[in-house]
């Protein structure tokens, strides 16, 4: 068994007050392992994004704990949690959230800049990562001049440039055609995933299920099933 | 933080339309603030022209006098009493009045006549042409070559004119630090000739000019002057009294300061609105930065840096534009007055800091509130 990347225990999360209160996550526990590509699937509103937000130090749970490297991240101060996100987690947002006024290489270098790395060193490291995702020729262009697939790869480059242990992809194929989406995920599994890294993916796209190591099925804020990737649903 | 500031700068200046709107708004505000306060400073300097040009240390006047252009003549015994006061090195009379001068062309032109003490010529201007001792010659006057010089038809040494049916003769051309407020040319002569040539009231001394033995004697001299029912002010105090008169008693100060405040509000509203819109449009990016690991304090520094950068660029352009206009105004516009000093630059700098601060404050509140979860949720 590989080392545990993240262990969540008894997570609960609700939004609103009184009669308007809705329960997004109800007592979820699970473990994700280094070297694993883990999918979270389920209908809209099932709590996938909320769960990953709590695991990644973005949204505080009402109760429960998230253990990374033996520490409950929600017992850290606000600045320590920001440092945890910076050093341990890489995000690929659904809409990428790339900075249109910066060049591609500058977008990729942002986590390194946040880590107070020297500007030129950060750009050099970002170029190396752009080489990994095959976009060195696009480095000086603004992201708006790139295709959807290329923008996705820039977002991936930005997520991995800081060498995080946990990579979180939110609907990575939502803005891409089927072929490009699958190619990207094949690239992620083949070139980005390694035994020191865990990749957590929220998706609806059944065409990429075959690439998952495990698939966590969620509904109504609970885990209803965990199965191996590539297995037929149901 | 240098890398973060570099990112902040690129985000700001690469959004060219917003950056331009921001800088233009601030530039316009600073231009208005600097221009209006400079004009007002220029007016105040001109209003104190006599005090500045004559340069006496203590000015004795009737207590009702509130500016050098509005004198109340004093009797001769005031001069004698002041001369006998402790701490006074010497004291001399000064005549200041306005007379109609009939020029060669037949035109009558009002002119300020300054009568200097015959013995000392205290307060005499710096001569450009002629000799100062010629002022003691028959009908002698020295003309001041300032912005109003042309109104006397640019007289040369030897030019004659009529003043109150007396012959006048230009024996020298001089310059002064500043010309007067109301666009009237100036002629200097001796005190005795002034009171002899010009129609006079019963008393003729406009001011007694006093030189103290030392700076330490000034308070005692002022006390003694007060005891005889008159007012003694140092040159700085007299300039301040004059400034206070124009600021608070004439309406000019209030109106110009009001215009300055309006300029400030225009700049604040344009830049505040533009910067706030800029931040709103980039709110998701700030949320993404938070999700990636940026701390609130780092984002606040980025916003303050952006607001400060835009403000300082606007400040520089605004001051530059004002300086250019003042330079051109002084060169080509008759009677134009403006004085760009440290105080109005400082005031404009303070106002630009307020603009940057207020613009940032709204944006900072918004960015601190944004939750990265909202970004992740889309």
Image: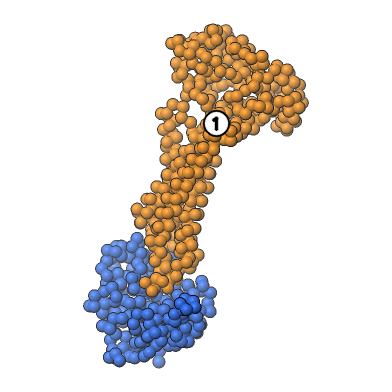
Chain colours: A blue, B orange
Q: Is residue B78 toward the left or the right of residue B156 in the image?
A: right
Q: 10 Å neighbourhood of mark 1: few (<14), some, or many (≥20)?
A: many
Question: Which quadrant would residue B209 be assigned to in this image?
Answer: top right
Q: Chain of mark 1?
A: B
Which residue: 43% across, 11% down? B105
Across and down, in percent, residue A25 comes to 43, 83
Q: Residue at x 68, y 19 (%)?
A: B74
Residue reaching furthest left? A179
| Residue visible at 53% across and 44% down in the picture | B346
Q: Is residue B319 visible?
A: no
Q: Identify which residue is drawn at 42% across, 44% down.
A: B28
Count the labels in the image. 1
Where is B354 relative to A217, above or below? above
Label 1's element? helix
Q: Quadrant of residue B273?
A: bottom left
The one of B174 and A6 positioned closer to us in this rendering: A6
Residue A97: x and y in percent read 35, 68
Q: Residue furthest front?
A: A19
Residue B349 shows in the view? yes
Quarter of the image containing the N terminus of chain A?
bottom left
Which quadrant of the rendered structure holds the C terminus of chain A? bottom left
* Residue matched to label 1: B45
Position of A5 relative to B54 (above/below): below
Residue B358 position within the rendered picture, expressed as x and y whole percent measured from the top left: 49, 54
């Amino acid at each position: 068994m590989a080392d545990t990347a993240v262990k969540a225990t008894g997570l609960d999360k609700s939004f609103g007050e009184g009669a308007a209160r809705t329960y997004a996550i109800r007592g979820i526990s699970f473990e994700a392992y280094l070297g694993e590509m883990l999918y979270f699937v389920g209908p809209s509103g099932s709590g996938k994004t909320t769960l990953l937000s709590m695991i990644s130090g973005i949204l505080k749970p009402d109760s429960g704990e998230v253990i990374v490297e033996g520490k409950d991240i929600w017992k850290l101060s606000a600045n320590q949690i920001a440092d945890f996100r910076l050093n341990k987690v890489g995000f690929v947002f659904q809409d990428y959230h790339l900075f249109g006024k910066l060049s591609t290489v500058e977008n990729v270098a942002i986590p390194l800049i946040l880590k107070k790395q020297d500007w030129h060193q950060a750009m050099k490291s970002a170029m190396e990562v752009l080489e990994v995702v095959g976009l060195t020729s696009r480095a000086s262009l603004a992201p708006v001049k790139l295709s959807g697939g290329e923008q996705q790869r820039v977002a991936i480059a930005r997520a991995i440039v800081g060498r995080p242990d946990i990579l979180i992809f939110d609907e990575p194929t939502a803005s891409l055609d089927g072929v490009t989406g699958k190619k990207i995920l094949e690239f992620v599994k083949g070139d980005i995933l390694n035994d020191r890294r865990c990749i957590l993916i929220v998706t609806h796209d059944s065409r990429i299920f075959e690439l998952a190591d495990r698939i966590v099925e969620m509904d109504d804020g609970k885990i209803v099933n965990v199965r191996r990737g590539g297995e037929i649903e149901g | 933080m240098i890398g973060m500031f570099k990112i902040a700068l690129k985000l700001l200046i690469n959004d060219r339309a917003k950056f331009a709107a921001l800088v233009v708004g601030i530039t316009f505000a600073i231009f208005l603030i600097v221009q209006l306060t400079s004009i007002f400073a220029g007016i105040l300097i001109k209003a104190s022209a006599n005090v500045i040009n004559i340069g006496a240390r203590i000015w004795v006047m009737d207590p009702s006098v509130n500016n050098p252009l509005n004198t109340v003549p004093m009797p001769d015994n005031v001069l004698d009493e002041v001369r006998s006061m402790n701490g006074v090195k010497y004291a001399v009379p000064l005549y200041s009045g306005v007379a109609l001068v009939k020029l060669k062309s037949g035109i009558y032109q009002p002119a300020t006549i300054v009568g200097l003490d015959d013995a000392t010529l205290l307060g005499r201007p710096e001569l450009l042409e002629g000799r100062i001792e010629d002022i003691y010659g028959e009908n002698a006057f020295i003309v001041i070559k300032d912005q109003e010089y042309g109104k006397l038809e640019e007289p040369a040494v030897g030019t004659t004119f009529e003043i109150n049916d007396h012959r006048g003769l230009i024996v020298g051309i001089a310059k002064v630090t500043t010309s007067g407020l109301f666009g009237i040319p100036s002629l200097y002569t001796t005190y005795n000739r002034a009171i002899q040539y010009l129609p006079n009231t019963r008393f003729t001394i406009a001011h007694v000019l006093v030189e103290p033995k030392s700076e330490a004697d000034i308070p005692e001299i002022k006390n003694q002057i007060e005891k005889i029912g008159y007012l003694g002010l140092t040159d700085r105090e007299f300039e301040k009294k004059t400034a206070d008169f124009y600021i608070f008693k004439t309406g000019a100060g209030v109106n110009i300061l009001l215009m300055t405040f309006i300029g400030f509000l225009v700049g604040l509203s344009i830049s505040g609105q533009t910067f706030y819109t800029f931040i709103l449009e980039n709110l998701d990016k700030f949320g993404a930065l938070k999700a990636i690991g940026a701390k609130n304090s780092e984002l606040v520094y980025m916003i303050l840096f952006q607001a400060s950068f835009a403000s300082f660029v606007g400040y520089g352009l605004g001051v530059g534009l004002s300086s250019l206009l003042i330079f051109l105004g002084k060169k080509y516009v008759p009677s134009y007055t403006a004085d760009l000093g440290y105080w109005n630059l400082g005031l404009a700098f303070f106002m630009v800091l307020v603009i940057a601060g207020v613009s940032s404050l709204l944006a900072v509140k918004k960015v601190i509130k944004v939750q990265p979860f909202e970004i992740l949720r889309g």
